[in-house]
Image: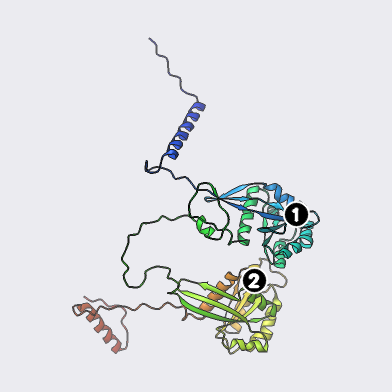
Amino acid sequence: MAFRKKKEPSRLKKYLGYNSKIQEVEKVTNGRQEGSSKHTRKRIEIKTIHLYPVICGHPDAVDLYLNMHPKIDIQVDNVRIRVTSSRGNDSFGKMSFSEAEVFLCVYDVRKPETVRFLRERVLPSVKKLRKPMAIAGLGLECRCGVEKGLVDIQTACQLGKSFDCKSTEFMCCDGKLLTFCTFALYSAVLPHLLQWKTEKPTTSSDISLTPTVNYFAIMAPKTRKVKSEKKENKPGPSTSSTPPDAQRRQVDILVAVVGAPEVVDRVIEKFSECRISTLTHETNIIAIEANGYYGRSNTANADLILAVYDVCDNSTVEYLTQNVLPHFRQEHEILAICGTGLENRTETRAENETDINTCNRLARLWNCRGTEVVTCSGPAMAAGLFALYATMNRDVFQKPDKEKKVDDAPGNEIGKRKKRSQHKAKEKGFERTKEKVC
């Protein structure tokens, strides 16, 4: 009797059978109830954030933006971001909306006429609405090639300075890249809105923007929680690495700002009163103007005299050296020189831009400290100023040395011998640092 050889399944059937087994395993593991097995999988919670920017600008630039992503979702960790944009003006520049979360004004880097249309017809109207706004150039990927006729690379920066708003350039060759760029600029314009409530976790829930919990803290990877045993509250110093506000030392810094009037006004506008928290100190920085004969009286009680100049304007350095610094030769101990606008320095030096060694040269000439700081953000500028003040006053921010404890118990002979040897060393005129006691 001949036995028929068993026919082997085809490769396609093997593949389909293998995939079906995987799907069954996933169904079983996902369908288990909590507590039925140790290998149960937790369902990932996906939260959704809706952004509603209003796109303004030349019709060609607005069409380029709207056609690239009508409705594309992106996912960052366990958060889904959905951008729903709408047109904000007509072909003549007349605004269609008076209320919006963010007015995003766009132009095409390949078409200079879109920049002129945006500057003359759209941006003044958006500025009058007094709503959050931002400027974006579309077509950043075109700058990598040899294409001619592009607008200047500093166009976005100049428009942002002129209309006092955030500005950048986007890649528009892909809808997802454009959505990511929109989300990044949106979060820079409205960082306080990207927060929400997380009282009861829900699966695939749409969450509205409400200022309760920090968005970036939720997006950060979660650390494993360790159950801590209950301990009795015993008196003694706290061992926590981050001391509470009551344990931080309070330091007030009064800064008298001198220099060219336009630079002084810009510095004081950035931080008229700023508060900085470090691990051990709570610092309040208050800036006042000290230009002119009457303003010079403000330097009498100042903790720091800050002589400022603009790194992109060489005339402010000449004004500082000729009209300001000669009056503060005696106050060199509390005098510091600060260059503002460090973020505007370019690899190819501009026509009126100062030399990179200007601050070092002035500090050596007037026997004081000096640095250059970023001024596009008030907190960043305040942090640079705080670091400069800390280097000038090391005693204020120096940590107190811990006193070495010597055991003076009556039964401890080692402690007595060590104390006796230290006393003899001081009498001889030198101090012994290390000593072994047998």
Q: Which mark is residue 58?
A: none
| Residue identifier under label 2 | 341
Q: Is residue 237 above or below residue 106?
A: below
Looking at the image, tell me whether mark 1 or mark 2 is earlier in sequence order.
1
Callout 1: few (<14), some (14-19), or many (20+) C-alpha neighbours within 10 Å? Answer: some
Q: Quadrant of the N terminus?
A: top left
Q: Is residue 361 left or right of residue 241?
A: right
**Amino acid type, label 1:** Arg
Residue furthest toward the left? 411
Task: Say which of 18 and 277 sits in front.
Answer: 277
**Amino acid type, label 2:** Gly
Task: Say which of 100 and 384 sits in front.
Answer: 100
Residue name at image x 57 percent, y 86 percent: 332
| Residue identifier under label 1 | 110
Callout 2: few (<14), some (14-19), or many (20+) C-alpha neighbours within 10 Å? Answer: some
SS type, badge 2: loop
Residue name at image x 51 percent, y 77 percent: 390
Q: CA distance from mark 1 to mark 2?
A: 29 Å
